[in-house]
Amino acid sequence: MLVIKVRVIPQLLLSDGLLKKPVQFKKPRTVANPISIARVFETRQVDELMLLDIGCAKHNTNFNRDILSLIAEELTVPLAVGGGVNNLETVAELIGGGAEKIVINTAAVETPELITAIAEKFGSQSIVVSIDALKNAQGEYEVFVQNGQHPTGLDPVAWAMETVERGAGELIVNSIAQDGAMDGYDIPLIKSVAEAVSVPVIAAGGASGPDDCVKAILQGRAAAVSISSLFLFRRITPIMIKDAMADAGIPVRRSETIRALTAGRHVSR
């Protein structure tokens, strides 16, 4: 019987070539050089690394390919890359530059056909649709785009189901209210999406410690956790997250497995 291992995915937010970290999608502060931080994660048993350029929406640019190239050349872990992706040409360039998965958010809402186009050309496994949600004045969850600044009127669960129908191979669900707050994941939001779709859901936004990650899997039904602030500002490592998951009976990849997988991937690059 095939056992699906739960993944721990650090999320690095970039802007102007630097690593940034906003809180609730506002007032991002500069943290460090993203390449240096990526090197650190390479040694800490991460399953993937997610690189999102949040400056693309503001400056109407594409993902910084120089940074992608430098990171892809040095790291062996799979890279999921997003920011400024709105056409197949950009997708091809990013995959050619070392990305294994492409993350789209605003472009998916503005041009839903792009999801299908990417899936048909590169495979569903290559596309991750990111869904940022916040409760509106009526107390209902609503999808927001443009770095969480613009409401869409879309219900997260209905939108998630549509993206999967169009070909999305994976979803990342992020609570804007919890983002950067390190106050726990929005379990009801994550669970509502995870139980409605047939593809893996990555929980994002709010992890304050290993216990929150365990809850995202066991209670939220997520297949992976994406973490940013917790790794950057507290003495918590991916290994500690995996230890807590293993103690809770959640299957995770250990260092030997990860080294074997990434060694083969590095050779093929």
Image (cartoon, rainbow, N blue to C red):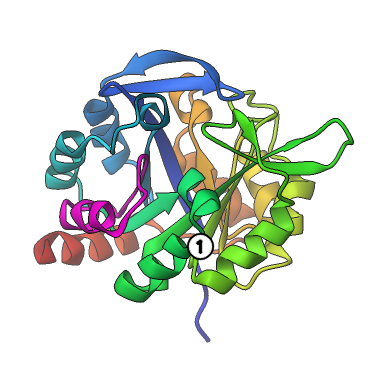
Looking at the rendered structure, the secondary structure element under dot 1 is strand
Q: Which residues are magenta?
A: 77-98
- In the rendered structure, which amino acid carries the disc numbered 1? Glu
Task: Report the front residue among 8 and 101.
Answer: 101
Is residue 30 a member of the stretch shown in magenta? Answer: no
Q: Residue 34's spot in the image, x, y percent? A: 28, 27
Q: Is residue 262 left or right of residue 66?
A: right
Image quadrant holding the C terminus, namely bottom left
The location of residue 89, given as percent across then percent down, is 23, 56
Is residue 199 in view from this perspective? no
* Residue 267 vs residue 113, the one in the foreground: 113
**Number of marks in the image?**
1
* Viewer-closest of 211 and 133: 133
Q: Which picture quadrant has residue 210?
A: top right
Please give the name of the residue rendered at 27% of the width and 65% of the height, measured from the top-left corner.
261
Q: Quadrant of residue 49?
A: top left
Q: Position of residue 218 (x, y in %)?
A: 71, 57
* Residue topped by disc 1: 170
Location of residue 39 by image quarter: top left
